[in-house]
Image: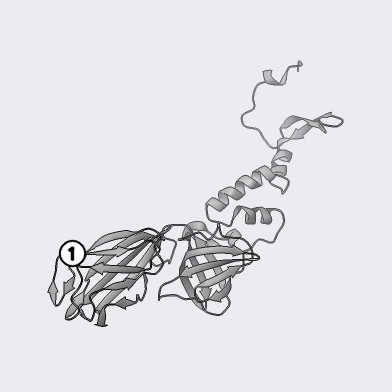
Amino acid sequence: MADSELQNLTELTSPGGDDLVFAVDDPAGSPLPRKLQVATIVGYLVTAAGDILYATAARTLARLGIGTAGQVLAVNAGATAPAWANAAAADGWTPDTATWTYASASTFTVATDVTAQFGKGTKLKLTQTTAKYFYVTASSYGAPNTTVTVTGGTDYTLANAAITLPRYSYADAPQGFPSWFTYAPTVVGYSSAPTSTVYRFRISGSACMVSLYEGASGTSDATTMTYTVPVACTATVQVPIAAPVDNAAAVANGVAQLPSGGSVINCFKAGYAAWTNSGAKRLAGLQVTYPF
């Protein structure tokens, strides 16, 4: 074969493992021309020395919800593969290899700064005898721990016990996660509260939606009507109240206001009028979405 410059050779578009490529050994020291099999190059890229390939694979797996990029790289470097390494991402959950430690009925700690991992609205699944589900409402780091604040309404609370099988998700609907959580607001303005009620909430990112329904009136003993919300509001929100009842009579749509920094919905009749401080009273139905 006549001598030819590399750029003038015919390109091989389907190389085999035993095909040869030109290589220069120790180009920064004493360079020597060498031949190199394609199979040898591929073998190098699928070992821990192939940092570029592993980093790319790690990021891809992390985006699919199978471990974090750091966790994937640790396994590639020779660490024992944990359960998440073979876990399918189809259920929307990412298993966490860190230890979650009970701190209170609404908080747990992790022994490192993981505030970025546990942003507002992150969905959690864990086991304490049975599976439990929560939203993250806040996280803060104070060396050496991150404290994660959660809410599961009245459906789930953390027990003073070991937390096993910790998982987190940023997906809209990871497998098994409740569409709504119930909660028990503090209701003010009644001598006897409304009955046949459904009070619930859901969180998406840093927005909380509260839905209040009252099937039967309570007895009023004040000109006010207020309900607490699951997490405090960060910007004033005002929405209409559909078909409220005042002094046993249906009245025009009222208005509900949740002030910035507040955790109480103030309810009024139309035009911000006060309620009658006697007789049957209820708001009937109300939905309010607010940032937290």
Residue visible at 66% across and 42% down in the picture: 52
Residue visible at 56% across and 79% down in the picture: 161
Residue 96 in view of the camera? no
Q: Quadrant of residue 44?
A: top right
Horizontal side, residue 279 vs residue 110: left or right = left
Coordinates of residue 62 in the picture (x, y in percent): 56, 53
Residue designated by label 1: 270
5 lies above or below 228: above
Q: Quadrant of residue 233?
A: bottom left
Task: Report the quarter where the C terminus lies.
Answer: bottom left
Residue that lies at the very extreme toward the bottom in this rendered image: 191
Of residues 173 and 252, which is closer to you in this image? 252
The kind of residue on which mark 1 rests is: Ala
43 lies above or below 229: above
25 lies above or below 128: above
Of residues 3 and 157, which is closer to you in this image? 157
Residue visible at 56% across and 48% down in the picture: 60
Residue 58 in view of the camera? yes
Coordinates of residue 72 in the picture (x, y in percent): 63, 54
